[in-house]
């Protein structure tokens, strides 16, 4: 339910315009990990407790091979006799170790699951809040699916990585260091011999990690693109079907899905190499220990029990080493996710209010554009040096061919985008000097493609003024002539509207949007007249409601209906980003210029 461009409520004021760049250092793993660590700042105590549990559990694990060795020597003490008393004692110790170890394992997982969920909760919250503060330009340059992918898949990846990796890293470190100590204690000679495999593990892991890192990054990126395509197809499903373009979108989907499959397979194959290769190296290591240990035992330097303990320790040394190598893969995927999340967190936000920003309490509604120029893309000017003045309470109709720049004018006035050159003033004060939130509140908009959120009709109208009472909502709906159709619905104001208002007709959606604007009671009104036809009665209703709404308010109308245009106080004809004519209907007709031509081509045969 992300509010869309053009809605009241959390609309955006554009700040740092320009191309959206990835964070400068975002591709550096250490940098990403450091930033991720920042989200653990409130978890240090919990992490320490988890670490203590893991350490105790690791130490207990280290005792097991030692006692197993002792047990073997008790069965096989050289005299072919079993020392039952000693064996029973050792077994009891081992049983206690297993019980305590399992309890500790449960507690670790419980703690770490909590930590991971809290961290991801904060990350998700930061990301969503950040999205609200990003300029509209950001949403123009990223598909919704791509953004959703970062909020869902990427965050999920980070979550999985955190919950899996924390225990793994801590437990493995304890196990590696502890087993190494025990191996040295049991036999420094055999320890030295078994260390031959360590550099092999290290270089292999590095080599594979380099490969998988790139592949996981590519995988997340492709998934984002695929989600973008899915989102777009679902949002535009009516158009897809109406133009019989199912096959085209399926083909596009297949192409993206194919790329995702290929990248996914390559990432999995490379990460899958790790375990079998490690096994080969480990078995090679065990071979060395067996041969070397055997010859030492034959010479009576060590006992068979010591060899058994040593092999167990060596397993406890190499297993976590392998697991660490494997976790490194999960980590790569998590880091790729985190990088993409941070990329958004690093985007430049809308312009911040200055310290002495003016909070608007009451305004008259005078609007001035002074030499305003604007371009969405560099070197493609959309508005060129526009200047005009509108007195309070005036109705101004913007007319002109499609793509002329009419919507852009209102987008700049409401602060959706920041201007490149010139000044926009309201009541003689530059809009940049007003506090952003209070500036937004002075506008009310009724746009052609009204966006309604999933929720009841009541909630959708209330979006215009969250503090409004039920009675205010009903009064607004009555003024907007929306009451009749709402009352006819079985559940009236509690009727549930689908996302986008798809279960209402276009006229009904417009009437709700008008009710919303009436409830907001804005100082300045922006109306984008619907071009598509609704039935004549509804159109009349909408017309009446609009007139009611426009009374005594400065109103900008992107006008398409002749009646609106004729009744406007001023008509501004826009063409190629410039004001080419300005005046009343009669004045402009008399002039015989652009407006006259437009009138002749579009309205001359229409009777009002
Ligand atoms: N978000 C955007 N990014 C890049 N270019 C844009 C964007 N929005 C509009 N434009 C371009 O700016 C120009 C003016 O568009 P604008 O929407 O202001 O025209 P308009 O007069 O309102 O047209 P219409 O009557 O069809 O709504 C067009 O060439 C359009 O392609």
Image (tube, grey):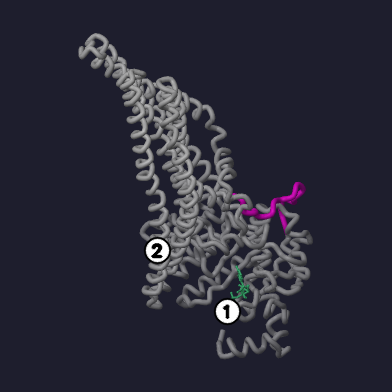
- Residue 126 colored in magenta in the image: no
Q: Which residues are magenta?
A: 345-363
Query: At numbered mark 1, what does the secondary structure look like: helix, strand or loop?
Result: loop
Q: Is residue 156 above or below residue 69?
A: below
Mark whose residue sits in front, 1 or 2: 2
Residue for point 52% across, 41% down: 122
Q: State whether the magenta stretch is mostly helix, strand or loop.
A: loop
Packing grade of label 1 (10 A; few <14, some 14-19, many >=20) is: some
Residue plotted at (42% across, 65% down): 256
Residue 348 magenta:
yes
- Identify the residue position indicated by label 1 in the image: 561
Q: Which mark is residue 375?
A: none
Decide if residue 125 is on the left or right side of residue 188.
Answer: right
Q: Residues within 10 Å of mark 2 (few under 14, many from 20)?
A: some
The C terminus, quarter of image: bottom right
Foreground of the two, 308 or 153: 308
* Residue 136 position within the rendered picture, expressed as x and y whole percent measured from the top left: 60, 60
Give how far across and how far down residue 280 sits, in percent. Answer: 35, 42
Report if residue 148 is visible in the image: no
Disc number for residue 257: 2
Q: Position of residue 522 (x, y in %)?
A: 63, 59
Q: Which numbered disc, 1 or 2, marks the residue that appears first in the sequence? A: 2
In this view, which residue lies farthest toward the top? 85
Vertical side of 255 occupied by 457: above or below? above
Q: Quadrant of residue 489?
A: bottom left
Answer whether residue 32 is visible to the viewer in this image.
yes
Question: How far separated are the C-alphas under marks 1 and 2?
Answer: 46 Å
Picture quadrant of ligand 1: bottom right
């Amino acid at each position: 339910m992300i509010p869309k461009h053009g809605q009241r409520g959390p609309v955006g004021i554009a700040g740092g315009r320009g191309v959206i760049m990835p964070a400068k250092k975002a591709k550096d793993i250490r940098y990403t990990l450091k930033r991720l660590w920042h989200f653990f700042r409130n978890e240090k105590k919990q992490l320490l407790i988890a670490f203590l549990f893991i350490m105790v559990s690791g130490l207990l694990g280290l005792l097991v091979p030692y006692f197993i060795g002792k047990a073997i020597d008790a069965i096989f003490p050289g005299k072919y006799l079993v020392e039952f008393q000693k064996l029973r004692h050792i077994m009891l110790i081992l049983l206690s170790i297993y019980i305590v170890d399992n309890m500790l394992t449960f507690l670790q997982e419980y703690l770490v699951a909590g930590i991971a969920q809290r961290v991801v909760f904060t990350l998700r919250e930061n990301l969503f809040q950040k999205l609200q503060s990003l300029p509209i330009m950001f949403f123009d340059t990223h598909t919704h699916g791509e953004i959703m992918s970062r909020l869902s898949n990427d965050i999920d990846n980070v979550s999985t990585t955190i919950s899996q990796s924390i225990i793994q890293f801590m437990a493995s470190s304890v196990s590696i260091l502890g087993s190494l100590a025990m191996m040295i204690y049991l036999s420094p000679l055999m320890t030295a011999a078994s260390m031959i495999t360590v550099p092999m593990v290290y270089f292999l892991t590095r080599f594979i990690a380099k490969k998988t890192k790139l592949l996981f990054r590519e995988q997340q990126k492709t998934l984002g693109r695929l989600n973008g395509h899915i989102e777009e197809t679902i949002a535009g499903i009516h158009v897809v079907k109406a133009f019989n373009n199912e096959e085209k979108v399926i083909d596009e989907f297949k192409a993206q899905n194919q790329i995702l499959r290929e990248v996914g397979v390559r990432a999995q194959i490379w990460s899958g190499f790790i375990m079998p290769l490690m096994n080969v190296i480990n078995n090679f290591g065990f071979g060395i220990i067996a041969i070397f240990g055997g010859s030492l035992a034959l010479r009576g330097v060590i006992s068979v029990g010591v060899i058994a303990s040593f092999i167990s320790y060596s397993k406890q040394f190499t297993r976590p080493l392998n697991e660490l190598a494997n976790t490194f893969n999960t980590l790569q995927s998590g880091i790729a996710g985190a990088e993409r999340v941070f990329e958004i967190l690093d985007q430049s936000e809308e312009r911040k209010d200055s310290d002495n920003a003016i909070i608007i309490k009451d305004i008259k509604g005078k609007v001035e554009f002074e030499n305003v120029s604007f371009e969405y893309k560099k070197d493609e000017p959309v508005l060129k040096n526009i200047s005009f003045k509108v007195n309070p309470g005036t109705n101004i109709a913007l007319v002109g061919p499609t793509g002329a720049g009419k919507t852009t004018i209102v987008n700049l006035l409401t602060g959706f985008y920041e201007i490149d050159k010139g000044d926009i003033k309201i009541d003689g004060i530059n809009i940049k000097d007003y506090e952003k939130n209070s500036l937004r509140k002075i506008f009310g908009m009724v746009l052609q493609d009204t966006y309604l959120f999933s929720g009841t009709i009541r909630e959708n109208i209330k979006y215009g003024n969250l503090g409004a009472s039920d009675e205010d909502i009903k009064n607004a709906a009555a003024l907007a002539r929306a009451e009749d159709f709402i009352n006819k619905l079985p559940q009236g104001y509690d009727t549930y509207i689908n996302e986008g208002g798809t279960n209402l007709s276009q006229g009904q959606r417009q009437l709700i949007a008008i009710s919303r604007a009436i409830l907001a009671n804005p100082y300045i009104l922006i109306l984008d007249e619907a071009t598509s036809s609704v039935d004549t009665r509804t159109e009349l209703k909408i017309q009446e409601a609009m007139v009611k709404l426009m009374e005594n308010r400065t109103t900008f109308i992107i006008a398409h209906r002749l009646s609106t245009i004729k009744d406007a106080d001023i008509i501004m004809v826009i063409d190629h980003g410039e004001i080419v004519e300005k005046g009343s209907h009669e004045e402009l007709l008399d002039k015989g210029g652009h407006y006259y031509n437009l009138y002749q081509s579009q309205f001359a045969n229409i009777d009002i």
